[in-house]
Image (cartoon, rainbow, N blue to C red):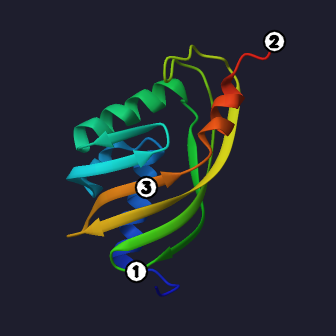
Amino acid sequence: MPEATTPDVDRLMSDYVDLRNGDLSKLDVLSDTFTFHLPIDEVRGRDAAEAMQREQEAAFPDFELTVDDMLADDDIVMWEWTVTGTHRGEWQGIPPTGREVAFAGMSKTVISEGKIQENWAYFDSRTLMAQLEDTA
């Protein structure tokens, strides 16, 4: 894979990160059959992705996904990222804790016909869940 991304991939990935950071006007970057594979869930379809995004925003209103590094070609993007946020609403059956979370991961994003078809997110879900556990 080349080290530099193409302008279309740059725009698409920038829009995808904006979407994950709460800009629902960017939903059109996802294909109708988009699949989001996570260690703790799998989301299929653009409507399900929107519902997941809304749940995330309610649970972590200050959610921030930051791209740390990216390597791309025209149809595959590998990228490292960091997520931060404060747990202020119910998420995955866990009532709000007010705790801040921070975790890192990596994703493989598959692009076809100018849309994001799949995103595979890899992160240690136990690290995330431990940050939300009641330790008192």
Per the image, the residue denoted by label 3 is 120
Left or right of 45 in this view: 123:
right
Looking at numbered disc 1 in the image, what kind of residue is underneath it? Asp
Looking at numbered disc 3 in the image, what kind of residue is underneath it? Trp
Per the image, the residue denoted by label 1 is 73
Quarter of the image with the C terminus in it: top right
Q: Earlier in the sequence, mark 1 or mark 3?
A: 1
Residue at disc 2, secondary structure: loop
**Residue 85 visible to the viewer:** no
Q: Quadrant of residue 129?
A: top right
Q: Residue 70: percent from the left, percent from the top? A: 54, 71
Q: Residue 25: percent from the left, percent from the top? A: 31, 46
Q: Earlier in the sequence, mark 3 or mark 2?
A: 3
Q: Give the Cα separation between the discs numbered 1 and 3.
A: 16 Å
Per the image, the residue denoted by label 2 is 136
Looking at numbered disc 2 in the image, what kind of residue is underneath it? Ala
